[in-house]
Amino acid sequence: MFNKRDTSSAEPDRSTTEAPIRSSSERASAPSSPTKGAGAVIGPSIHIEGALKGDEDLLIEGKVKGTVELKKNSVTIGESGQVNADIFAHTIAVEGRLEGKLIASERVMIRKSAQIRGTIVAPRVTLEDGAQFNGSIDMDPETDALKNAFSAPAHPAARSEKTSGAPISGSADKQAANAPAKSLQ
């Protein structure tokens, strides 16, 4: 009953019930995702030039040049990431190298391993001791750059008739404009 050697049924097997413990560097490099899964990864051997758009979180470990637009998601530039781009995202974390604009609707986190040259526009900015930053920071939540970057585009139906074609004034003109085109046979 009190035999210390017999542990067959006294304690559950914890090797399958406990989650693995991650180091702080592993947690820092993983993109934060409050609502979605792990997201997409641009690996260290991948080089991308152009515009990146999407609806999921992104971890960049490779090279990206151009524009990154994930306005409702998180973008993390990992320690091996090298980015020469303007980034528009909900949350941005930088551990690698970046040259360009960081525009976030929520916050930008600059880790101690980061090297940044550019502009940061976000309501909240965290700059860890040891990070290298050369540029400007705008933390005004009412700034035009932030409003323009995250404002909803105008709906096409909201355009006036004058910008979408010839003005239609009378009922006969409206019927003619809406009538199917006659074929010339």
Image (spheres, rainbow, N blue to C red):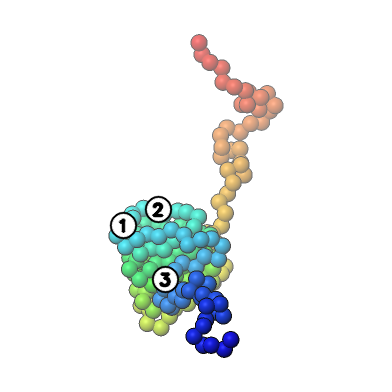
34 or 161, which lies in front?
A: 34
Q: Which residue is mark 2?
A: 51
Q: Residues within 10 Å of mark 2 (few under 14, many from 20)?
A: few
- State which tag comes first along the sequence, 3 or 1: 3
Q: Residues within 10 Å of mark 3 (few under 14, many from 20)?
A: some
> Residue 80, how many percent across, how many down?
33, 68
96 or 185, which lies in front?
A: 96
Name the outermost residue toward the right. Answer: 171
- State which tag comes first along the sequence, 2 or 3: 3
Q: Residue at the spot x=62%, y=44% of the render?
A: 158
**Left or right for 168, reference 8:** right
Residue type (three-letter) at the residue carrying disc 1: His
Residue type (three-letter) at the residue carrying disc 3: Ser
123 or 19, which lies in front?
A: 19
Please identify the quadrant where the N terminus is shown: bottom right
> Residue 111, how many percent across, how many down?
41, 76
Q: Residue at the spot x=66%, y=27% of the render?
A: 174
The disc at residue 29 is: 3
19 or 79, which lies in front?
A: 19
- Dot in front, 3 or 1: 3
Q: Residue at the spot x=40%, y=53% of the render?
A: 51
Q: CA distance from mark 3 to mark 1?
A: 19 Å
> Residue 124, how many percent across, how many down?
52, 74
Q: CA distance from mark 1 to mark 2?
A: 13 Å
Residue type (three-letter) at the residue carrying disc 2: Ala
Q: Which residue is mark 1?
A: 47
What secondary structure is marked by label 1?
strand
Contact between marks 3 and 1 (CB within 8 A): the answer is no
Quarter where residue 60 is shown: bottom left
